[in-house]
Image (cartoon, helix red, strand yellow):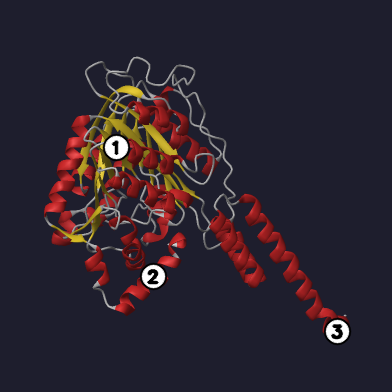
Amino acid sequence: MEDFLAGYGPYLVFVASIVVGLAAALHAAMHKDEVRTALGWAALVLFSPFLGAFLYFVAGVNRIRRERIGRRRRGIARDEPDGQGLAGAIAIPALARLGESVSPFPMTPGNHIVPLDGGDEAYPAMVAAIDTARRSVALSSYIFDHDEAGLAVAAALARAKARGVHVKALIDGVGSRYSRPPITRLLKSQGVSCALFLDGFLGLRLPYANLRNHRKILVVDGRIGFSGGMNIRAHFLRSVMGDETARDTHFRIEGPVVSQLMSVFAEDWRFATGETLLGRRWYGDAVADGAGGAPARVVPSGPDEVLDSTHAMLIGALAEARMRVILSTPYFLPDQALVAAFAIAARRGVAVDIVIPAANNLKLVDYAMTAQLDQVIRHGCRVWRARGPFDHSKLFCVDGVWSYIGSSNLDPRSLRLNFEIDMEVHDPGLATWIETRLRARIADATRETRETLGARPFMERLRNRVVWLASPML
């Protein structure tokens, strides 16, 4: 055998490299939707068969094949026309129709959505809601740190459990490792039912290593919901961070759209644990109260059957904008389809304002962002670097009447790799709040122009461009 391996080993390795490389290249060609993505992976695996195939196996193959969230969830029926009886309340009918085609949920009236500015507003409101729970609490977070903020929420969950409330906490497998000791250890010791989404990042589940559950959901008794961009961590508490407190925006929600939040949580919980959550205990009686409220719907997205949902909604919003678009995102790395949508909106005369942080918590992402900003600036979009502490908010507003809020960033990870949850809201009141908040940020911001980008030293621009090449992996 040793003689055989010595004589034929190199040939066997050569043949194996061809087989492995061709198999991975063919898989990329057959399953990738974008030509450049398919070509990039094919070139990598053909020129470096074993390493390239391993990287493709870990980061390039979408193994998440989950059944699309059911078209019916406790009274949510899709056999009724979307927006029936809402014609006068829908701010932009074309976007409501688009949402009907990309989301598994209908537009529902009578939702009351209250913005919560930062952790000092959001966490006490979340704890207060958990303390009112009588039947159930469902909580999902990408990051749930073992710190002052996390301990306050964990204590509220433990109190609910002690009262006999059914409590479920779902944390992303990667996000759970942001603090030590992990909060899951404390939750389990207090009897809280806790699970990790795609656990085993450093173990036997390498195929899922590049995927994250980035959703933020809290549902109490199927009646009160919270969602938005905020993780559970002390970085957002002024009592801990002082003048360096990071900013973010979360939302307290009441109305029938809460059942949609619960449906997304239940699907994630079933995927992570195999347990099905059904019935009034979890879905409550969240119905329109008839006293105003906004039409809204949940738009889930992720590397499964709802891959392009947010991507489609944002492109549609830019196409429908008539006067102005204003948005805030911590990570602005749109793909070429979104870049074109931004450019066309600006060239049609729409005022497009993009607010990004001057100080970013992820330096590599900031380098890549800076390298790409010229692609929207040169077509008339205005890009503002907001001074002050890092702002993690994800806010998108069109013509002062339509908002898109939730967990999605405008980068490849959120648009292609993460499980995200957002909401389409037709409400001038909420849109006005968002615009006012972002205009205040712009008032204390520095505008990026082609001149400011070009004035950077060559080596800095080169560094940014090199990092930008790897932006799909950031």
Kindly state the secondary structure of the residue where label 1 is placed: loop
In this rendering, is residue 209 above or below 214? below
Q: Residues within 10 Å of mark 2 (few under 14, many from 20)?
A: some
Say which element carries label 3.
helix
- The image quadrant where one finds the C terminus is bottom left
Residue, disc 3: 7
76 or 279: nearer the viewer: 76
Q: Is residue 237 left or right of residue 41?
A: left
Q: Name the residue at 43% across, 40% down.
A: 312
Q: Which residue is mark 1?
A: 321
Q: Is residue 221 visible?
A: no
Q: Which residue is mark 2?
A: 465
Question: Could you tell me how far apart the alpha carbons at marks 1 and 2 are, in whole angstroms?
Answer: 31 Å
User: Which residue occupies 22% across, 17% down?
Assistant: 291
Q: Amino acid at mark 1?
A: Ala
Mark linked to residue 450? none
Of the numbered discs 1 and 3, the one sitting upstream in the chain is 3
Q: Quadrant of residue 315?
A: top left
